[in-house]
Each structure stands twice: as structure tokens, then as C-alpha cells.
Image (cartoon, rainbow, N blue to C red):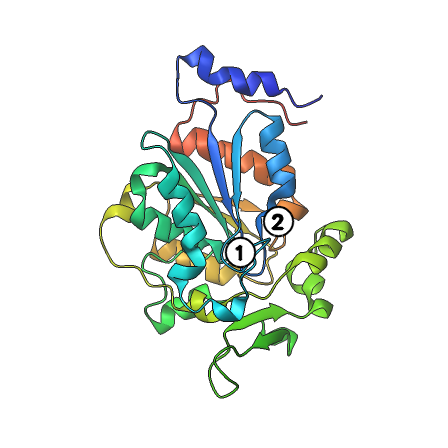
Amino acid sequence: MRVKEEKAMAVSEESGDSRGPIHFVLVHGIGGGAWCWYKIRCLMENSGYKVSCIDLKSAGIDQSHADSVLSFDDYNQPLMDFLSALPENEQVILVGHSAGGLSVTEACHKFAKKIHLAVYVAATMLKLGFLTDEDLKHGVPDLSEFGDVYQLGFGLGQDKPPTSALVKKEFQRKIIYHLSPHEDSTLASMLLRAGPILALTSARFAEDGEVEKVPRVYIRTRQDHVMKAEQQEAMIKRWPPLSVYELDSDHSPFFSTPFLLFGLLLKAAAVDFGCNLTNPPSVL
């Protein structure tokens, strides 16, 4: 069956809900960009949902260079600007992949009233960011088993810690996209950019109580070579979300299992947040 856009668009009208279509905001991980979500965006928009995909600083089509982005606040500013510009009465479902989980968490600290639900997809989920060695152990990927995989940038000088990192092309499919279609891993190899690792590992958030006002869902990726299963489980145990779902996917379920990821995002919105999806669109 074809996706029925009219059915989803009619949900709010039938229920008397004047908020308009549900608005999903999708945030990429390190090195990615808004382009990562192209399959999910098509599924959502064809089903009548509103979708925004964010390019963080130095990612996607943003012209900044990763070696010039030295603080997490700078890196995440595009998302903060986007949420700040939303009308006061508009709320979104915020979805973060991988390191995009840090961006989602900061948004929950600063814009709790504008976020219906936070969804972490194989993502770093640390309430206060990187404060301790335990946070780094759980939230930073360890790819040492694959060898020398990173191409590093030293924006502050060769004698200083690296400011950017990119997984070398010869390792990208094996590590990030091993269950994804070859077309998608080829596309990614052409579009991936170095990510500002110094800025990301400097992410720290003050305890303010606001973040707990936003309901959270975690989507685990069972065959993930980047965010290992034990890391995901540790973060879930330390800061339990409302619900945990699981996909038999690699680190990039938006490529490897897009229909299943789309379905889980709608399920999370309906079951955990309570959006009116009594007549959900068909996606088969």
C-alpha cells in the first residue's frame, strides 16, 4: 500500500487537536549532518508529519571547519537557535543519534517546555554530560579494536589535544554501516566530515531540574560497533528513560532499518508521550 498522507494529516482535525501535525526534530551524530535522515524524513513527511533536520556547527552544509569549533555551546548553537525561534506554544519531539544525544540533553536542560519527548537513538545519554571518567567510559566510543581508525585534526597545534576526528574511509563501512545498504555507505563516505571532538568532550550541563521534566525514550542498536551494547546499557541504568526499544541494526538504523526506526519513533510518540495516533498512517 502507498503511504496515506491524508490519514495522518487528518488526525489532529478528527481529535479536535489544533496543534497541527506532530513536529519531529532530528539531530545527527559526529561527522554526520541533516542528510543522514533522508529516508526517515521522507517516511515522516509522506505520512503527514512535520520534520526538521538540523546541521550542527561544522556539519552538513554548515561552512565552519571542525578545528575552529572548540566549545560544545558553539557546536550546538544551531539547535539552540532553532528551538529558541519556535513559537512559545509549539512543542517538538526531539530525536538525537549517537553524539547527537548530547545535543538533545542540552536542549532538555534549556528548552524543557518546548520538548514533548526526547528520543535517543544509539546515543550518548548522560544527564550532566562528561563530568567524570565513568561518563567518558560510557559515552565515548572506543574503536581501538579496529586499529588506527581516526584521521585527526590539531587546530590548536600538534602539541595540543586533537580538535577534530574523522573515521578513515577504509574503516567507515566496517565500523559504522556494516548492515546498511552499500548505496548508503557510499553516500556517507562522500558526505561525512570531521567532527569537533574537543568541543563534544567538553559538553557539561548544570543540574537544574528542568531536564527531568522531559520524558525520554532510548532506542538500542543490537549490532552496534560504535556505541557498544554495554555502553548503551550502562547509560540506560544510570539515567533510566521511560521506555527502551531495540533494533537489530548497526550504528546507523536510519540506513539499515529505516522502516523499523520510523515505526519505533511513532510508537514512542503514541505510547510514551501520548500523541494522538489512533489512526496512524500505513507504511507498508
Residue 188 location in percent, x, y? Answer: 69, 56
How far separated are the C-alphas under marks 1 and 2? 9 Å
Asked whether the beta carbons under mark 1 and mark 2 sit within 8 Å of each other, the answer is: yes
Q: Residue at x 47, y 66 (%)?
A: 69
Helix, strand or loop for disc 2: helix
**Residue at mark 1:** 29
Residue 146 location in percent, x, y? Answer: 65, 74
**Label 2 amino acid?**
Cys
Helix, strand or loop for disc 1: loop
Relative to 48, 103 lies left or right:
left
- Single out the residue that lies furthest toward the right: 182
Give the camera-side residue of 277 and 206: 206
Q: Residue at x 38, y 36 (%)?
A: 86
Give the camera-side residue of 6 and 74: 74
Relative to 102, 34 lies left or right:
right
Residue 70 location in percent, x, y? Answer: 43, 69
Which is nearer the N-term, disc 1 or disc 2? 1
- Choose top left, top right, bottom left or bottom right for residue 43: top right
Q: Report crowding for label 2: few under 14, some 14 to 19, many 20 or more residues within 10 A (C-alpha).
A: many
As displayed, is residue 17 above or below residue 53? above
**Residue at mark 2:** 36
Residue 216 visible here? no
- Single out the residue that lies furthest toward the front: 63
